[in-house]
Amino acid sequence: MVSAAVLAGAGAGYVYYEHLNGNLDKDRLNLGDNRLDRAEANEFGQTPLNILLLGSDSRASKENQELGGAKKDAGRKPLADVQMLLHVSPDRSNASVVSIPRDTRVKIPKCTDPDDGTVYPETDDTINSSLQHGGPGCTVAAWEELTGIPVDHFMMIDFAGVVSMADAVGGVPVCVDANVEDSDSGLKLTEGDHTIRGEQALQWLRTRHGFEDGSDIGRTHGQHMYLNAMIRQLKSGTKLTDPGRLTSLAEAATKALTVDDGLGSVKKLYDLGEQLQKIPTDRITMTTMPWQQDPQNPGAHVIPTADAEKLFSMIRSDTPLDGRGKKGKKEKGSARPEDAPAARDGIAVTVLNGTGTVAQAPVPGRAAAVAGLLTADGFTQAAADAVPKSQADTTVSYPSADLEADAKLVAEALGVPGSAVRKSSAVQSVTVVVGADWREGRTYPEKPAAGQDDKAPDSASALNAADDGACMKVNPRYSW
């Protein structure tokens, strides 16, 4: 979508290009005191992308007040009522989306507003309120703390932006399995297929009572169906052949967005759009964070379950949520045909301390402690490195195929699972990063089994973007 929009602007020349740049609002990426390290490159120098997509309920403008109602909230700081993390694989072959319901209770870390210096202390609250703690950068910090996934960028849109974008693409096809009327959002549709645009598109995205059980969970499912349909529309190109419509889309896209400084130009958005365009529609998977009722406030708030951690772990390890990941593929070009490791005292191992996270300070001396375990086990060339790291999971990386067996031997000696062993162009030797999952002890903590490891858990309600037969289930109490 962004790619097509920028192409429209590029055709109009430099002056219009600069005009589109001026449309974009920009803000700081992360307002917390700490942040996770970016994901490392794989053996081909490719890195994954993690982009937080936010929908704001701001009533700051007259247009947003008219669309969102509740004019009494005009002076209230906005809430981030839509939150989705888009994860794009390093080779751009697949993408995963995880929504977190707005009423999820989380720990919001300390954040500092970059505009006025206000310091918001750490608090326990619903994740949508994080936007009020200095801006979208605090929501980024909250996501990193909750999921252990490093966030590279964010993109935020408000009510008016949703309307203008839906109009610019000529409407989005949706389906409901019964007549529905939700007076809170204003949505009213008859059973079957519809193409919604403008304010009706906003009504669809805001509807919660009219869908499924009337909770925010159903709303996330409706948002997934909408986004999947828009993706199919845009990738088909059927709505993007008219130059006038492309120009309209370019204006709408840039006026609608607030982005981090790393995406703060039309050129950067265009490059991102070009990468996203490569992903096949049938390799895009939408999910909702597995949840349970919050024991502190049942019926009003939810909290993550064990399946949620499994989902987050799959994204951290770049495991496709559609179950179509590569399994059992052997590295080519190994210098050892028998795939035999070197002698332990001949393997150079670098150990780094990655135990510091958004929520926790690093454990002092942790890299030296783990290097000492390896030395005592015969890896006499193991040494700690003082370079600070920050990541959720312990990993063992190696730079080339001839060191794969060595890396596996190191992982085995530490009790680290084989899934944590990976090839990376960012390291020069076998490298252990001791993550936040191993802050103490002499052996790597055994993790409980969480079912199948090759696809998203059933509780995540996965929906493939190529599924054009999906139809939203209507809450019977809101049918007519």
Image (cartoon, rainbow, N blue to C red):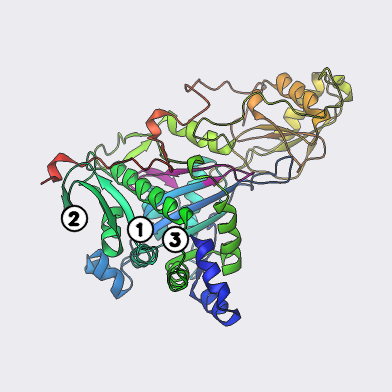
Amino acid carrying label 3: it is Met
Q: Nearer the viewer, mark 2 or mark 1?
A: 2
> What is the distance, in whole Å, between disc 3 and disc 2 at their CAs?
23 Å
393 in magenta: no
Question: In the drawing, what numbered circle is on residue 156?
Answer: 3
Amino acid carrying label 1: it is Leu
102 in magenta: yes
Please name whichever residue, 115 or 57, is drawn nearer the observer in this view of the structure: 57
**At 41% across and 36% down in the image, what residue appears?**
462
Q: Is residue 323 in view?
A: yes
Q: Secondary structure at mark 2?
A: loop
Residues at marks 3 and 2 touching, judged by CB atoms closer than 8 Å: no
State left or right for residue 409 relative to residue 113.
Answer: right
Query: Vertical placement of 399 versus 223: above or below?
Result: above
Please name whichever residue, 404 or 143, is drawn nearer the observer in this view of the structure: 404
Mark found first going from the N terminus, 2 or 1: 1
Which residues, given as a range, are shown in magenta? Answer: 87-108
Please name whichever residue, 153 or 476, is drawn nearer the observer in this view of the structure: 476
Amino acid carrying label 2: it is Asp
The residue to which callout 1 is attached is 79
* Residue density around tag 1, few if under 14, some if 14–19, many if 20 or more, within 10 Å: many
State left or right for residue 376 relative to residue 472.
Answer: right
> What is the distance, in whole Å, between disc 1 and disc 3 at their CAs?
11 Å
Query: Vertical placement of 206 versus 415: above or below?
Result: below
Q: Secondary structure at mark 1?
A: loop
* Residue density around tag 3, few if under 14, some if 14–19, many if 20 or more, within 10 Å: many
Please name whichever residue, 24 or 224, is drawn nearer the observer in this view of the structure: 224
Residues at marks 1 and 3 touching, judged by CB atoms closer than 8 Å: no
Q: Residue furthest left?
A: 480
Question: In the drawing, what numbered circle is on residue 184?
Answer: 2
